[in-house]
Structure formats: C-alpha cells, structure tokens
Amino acid sequence: MRKSKSKKVFTTVLLVSLAIIMLLTSCGTAAEPETTDPENGNTEAPGETGDTIKIGGLAPLTGNVSIYGIAVNNGVQLAIEEVNENGGVLGKQIEYIVYDEKGETVEATNAYNRLVNDDKVVAVIGDVTSEPSIAVAQRAARDNMPLITASGTSADITKQGENVFRACFIDEVQGDLMGAFVANNLELKKAAILYNVSDNYSQGLTDAFTARCEEEGVEIVASENYSSTDTDFKTQLTKIKTAGAEVLYVPNYYNDNIMIVRQAKQVGLDVPYLGGDGWDGVLSENVIGTEKNDADGAYFTNHYAQDDPNEKLQSFLSAYREAYDMEAVSFAALGYDAANMMIQAIEEAGNTDSDAIIDAMKNLEYEGVTGNITFDDNNNPIKTVSIILIKDGEYTLSTKMQSDE
C-alpha cells in the first residue's frame, strides 16, 4: 500500500510539472519578442526599442592606433547627430553604441559579441583597422549582421560575407594606382620600397604596387622591410640609395613615414616619397612637430583632398571643425560616409530586417564627402581616388584617378 501511494504522488507531481512547462511555453519566453505598432501593424525588430534604432560601433579609442579610431568615431557621431536632428530614420532616433577595442582583435570580437547579444543592434559600423575588421566580419557573416568598415582596406574583409561592406577603397587599388602614377605621371623608371613586414596593410600595398610597376615597365631596384618595433631605417635607406632608386614607396602609417622620410634625407636619398592613405595625418602637430616642411614632395593616395571645392565635402569639413575644434582627416570623412550609407540603406529598406538592409546596401547610390559611391560585386566601393601632394607643409590635390586606369 505504501509503495502504491508513493507512486501516485510521483505521478501527480510529474503531471503538474509538465503542465507548468507547457503553460510557460505557450505564454512565450523569447528574449526579443516582436511588438506590433497599433497604428500601422508593423512589427518591431530587435534593435528597435520604442522611439530608437540601435546601431553599434567598434573603434580603437585608446592604444597605438587610437588616432584613427577617434577620427572615424567622430565622423560617425557627427553623421548620426545630423540625422537625429533632422528627424532620425524611419521616424525613430538612432541610438549609437560604440565600444573601444584598443586596436586588438580579441577586444574587437568581444565588443562585437556584446553589441549583438546584449545591446541587440541592427547594424554595426566597424572596425577601423584591417585585422580586427577581418575578425569581426567573420562573426558578422555568421550572424547575417549588416556591417560596414569605414577604413579597413584589406581585401579579405568583404570576402567574409555578403553582409560586409566598406566605405574606403582596398589596398590593391591604392598600390595599383600609385604604380601607374610613377610610370605615367612622374615618368620614372626605377622605384624602391620600404615596407612593414609585420603589417597586412603595408604588405597589401607593396604587393599591388610591385605588380603594377612590373606591368608598366618600372624596375623595382630595391625592396627593403622592417618590423613594427623598429625606429632606425638608415641601413635599408642606404641600400636603396646605392641601388639608384628614383622614387621611394613608403606604404606605412604616418608615424613611421615621417621617421623614414627624415632619415632618408639624412643619408642623402632625395627622391619623391609615395604612399597610401596611412600618410593622412602626417602633418598633425603631434606627429611632424614644428618642421612641417619635412614631408614636402610626398605623394599619397587618399579618399579626398581638403582643397577640393566639392560643396558637400566643404560643408562636412566646416561642420567637423565646429564640432571638434580640429581639422578632419580622411578617416573622419570615411566614418561620416560609412554611417550615412548604413542609415540610407535602413531608410531605403523601410525596416530593420537584416536581409532588407543588406539588399539595400548592395543597390545603394550614395553621394558622399569622399565621392559618389556604388558597390561592386565584392561590396567594395566604386569611386575616384585622390592623389595628394604635400607642398609647403600643406595637403594639396595633385590629380584624381579611377581604379581602372
């Protein structure tokens, strides 16, 4: 009898437990339930909360490359503030949530996961430099998260997924056009290269420049390298001088570039210096100091020229100056364009569904401060490239080139 009664009690408890589980399931326990707008019947997707739409940002706001991250983030914030002041997007204000990833890949991926899992953003603007951008793009591809990097130039970034876009041109375009510039504009026949062997950006520019020089009949008489921690380049520069180089390609970031140029002059290597968009910012006071003419005669590929009379560009430069009490560099302009492209895509999509935003991005026609932009089949922007000449301690527009020249 006691055994039978115990069995009945167990059965009753089991049935009650099952009933509770079924009740909870029928009531719904999803973390992000869709809500319905009673006026138009539209559902509200994750990332839309009340009167806001959440967009995430990733940038190195501290660390060795923070000057790039701060510039990009400033441009993004300026764009979003302007959009919000003009009524927002889809009738909602944009809530911009940005995390400092310190220029580190692990920090970047952790920050991305936080944006997606905790903040429930509908799109991400980031990352800033190439290696963190690749890592973040891999995760965004798995999540089908609309993502645009303002300034990550490695071709591998947009290869991670159909949802990944960029506002800047890729390393291959910069290196290729500068090779053509040496042959067709400077009309020189002997080039040398000094690149950072431990940096993907520098290596990518070097490979493309080398290939185009060979195609144009420009001889690479010396190809020297260094590592990220190096500060003395005189040995490499002396070899380059001995090789008879008529021009030196320095495809690195501006902190290294100004040291290389000054040391090149010390060893008597007085030739034109060339580079990519990493040169932008070399004239900043904290980089070049008081000797602003030390970089004179250098040419570099860039996304725009400050003396370009384009009305939209000049309006941006003025607004940036007023907002941050400093001059904008190309990274700020790219951040501004990246944010506005994503916002325009959300507006044209008509909602915050990932597939709708991605489709709108692919078909985007955007008039920006760094040019009129559409995307190619690899989600890379089709636009002109500016060749900047540093003259009398100022950036000046030398010429503009198309990526197919």
Image (spheres, helix red, strand yellow):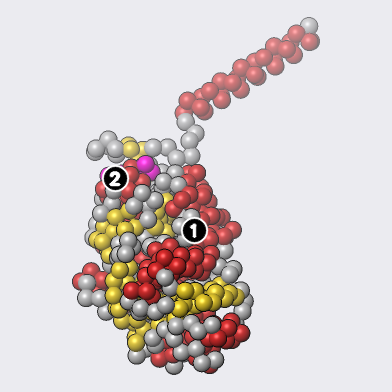
Q: Nearer the viewer, residue 8 or 293?
A: 293
The furthest residue to the right:
2
Q: Residue, x 37% and y 74% (percent of image)? A: 183
Magenta span of residues: 349-355
Amino acid residing under circle 2: Ala
Q: Residue, x 64% and y 19% (percent of image)? A: 14
Give the residue at mark 2. Answer: 349
Residue 111 in sight here:
no
Percent position of residue 74, x then y: 39, 69
Give the residue at mark 1. Answer: 133
Placement of 194 over or under 367, stated as above or below: below
Q: Nearer the viewer, residue 228 or 209?
A: 209
Amino acid residing under circle 1: Ser
Percent position of residue 77, x then y: 36, 65
Using a 10 Å C-alpha cutoff, classify the residue at mark 1 as few (fewer than 14 neighbours), some (14 to 19) or many (20 or more): many
Q: CA distance from mark 1 to mark 2?
A: 25 Å
Percent position of residue 63, x then y: 55, 72
Quadrant (top left/top right/bottom left/bottom right) for the C terminus: bottom left
Q: Residue, x 42% and y 37% (percent of image)? A: 33
The furthest residue to the top:
1
- Residue 279 sits in quarter: bottom left
How many numbered marks have been drawn onto this rendered protein structure?
2
Using a 10 Å C-alpha cutoff, classify the residue at mark 2 as few (fewer than 14 neighbours), some (14 to 19) or many (20 or more): some
Q: Is residue 216 left or right of residue 39?
A: right
Q: Nearer the viewer, residue 31 or 364?
A: 364
